[in-house]
Image (spheres, grey):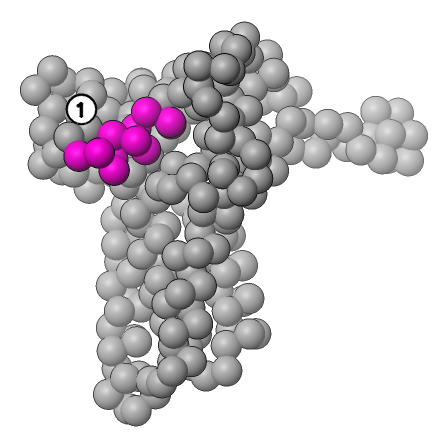
Amino acid sequence: MTSGTGPRYARDRDMTLGKAFATFLRELPPKFLILNLVGWIAYRTWLATQGDVGLADLVPLLGIPLFHPFAEWLIHVHILHHRPRRVLAGVVGEQGLRWDYHAARYHRLHHRDPWDLRFVLMPLPAMAVGGLAMGLGAWLLAPSMGVFATTMLLASAAALYYEWIHFLTHTSYHPRGWFYKRQWRFHRLHHYKNERYWMGVTRHLGDMVLGTMPDPEKVESSKTARTLGVEDTLGA
């Protein structure tokens, strides 16, 4: 693995799952996600000892795994693949304001060099905003603190799993089991064949329901898979 302030890669020929995981743990975002998950596990366990547990916990236990593939799809399509545009032209100056997302700019760099680990994991500011939004929504909807904590625990676990699988597909580790091999194949197709399809990373229920899961043999290779149609990664 290369290191330093420049591009970082995990493309060792003898890459094992253990070596890939050790590399993953050296990055800051996974450390943040692990601490976050441990905190929610501890809090949920404490609430359970106080008697705050019941059938209502089944709602997030069933709902989060079902919703997560669609959350992946929506975030990938509408935020990460967002193209910068000008808004309020003539209202705020002649050219208006440039509307873009930090996460989208980051993701464009990821597509330019899919192997560079600097741009594989979600940046911490985006994680913080996403966590706060999830927390606020769960707090407003949950009937008890126990259900709120269960929701946040499962959402935190899903986020960590997503980051791990995404990280792993951008290393030289070769898939062994059929389940991960399928994830690996579709994500590679997204990066190297056509960026408009296979938007899921951990699962592809969202792709199947929302029409972005075609037969790869029937999909033309895209000329913009590396640029996402934006020549300047900053989208200026």
Q: Name the residue under label 1.
A: 174
Identified by mark 1, the residue type is His
Identity of the residue drawn at 50% across and 26% down? 214
Q: From the viewer's side, name the closer residue of 211 and 13.
A: 211
Residue 95 image offset from top left, x and y in percent: 83, 24
Q: Is mark 1 on a helix, strand or loop?
A: loop
Location of the N terminus by quadrant is top left
Q: From the viewer's side, name the closer residue of 41 and 194.
A: 194
Q: Main SS type for the magenta part?
A: helix
Examine the structure image and report whether residue 214 is included in the region drawn in magenta: no
Residue 112 in view, yes or no: no
Horizontal arrangement in the rendering, residue 176 relative to residue 48 (left or right): left
Q: From the viewer's side, name the closer residue of 145 and 9.
A: 145
Location of the C terminus by quadrant is top right
Asked where in the image residue 136 lies, by quadrant, the reply is bottom right
Identity of the residue drawn at 55% across and 24% down? 196
Label 1 Cα crowd, 10 Å radius (few <14 / some 14-19 / many 20+): some
Which residue range is magenta in the image?
177-187
Horizontal arrangement in the rendering, residue 116 relative to residue 84 (left or right): left
Residue 47 image offset from top left, x and y in percent: 31, 83
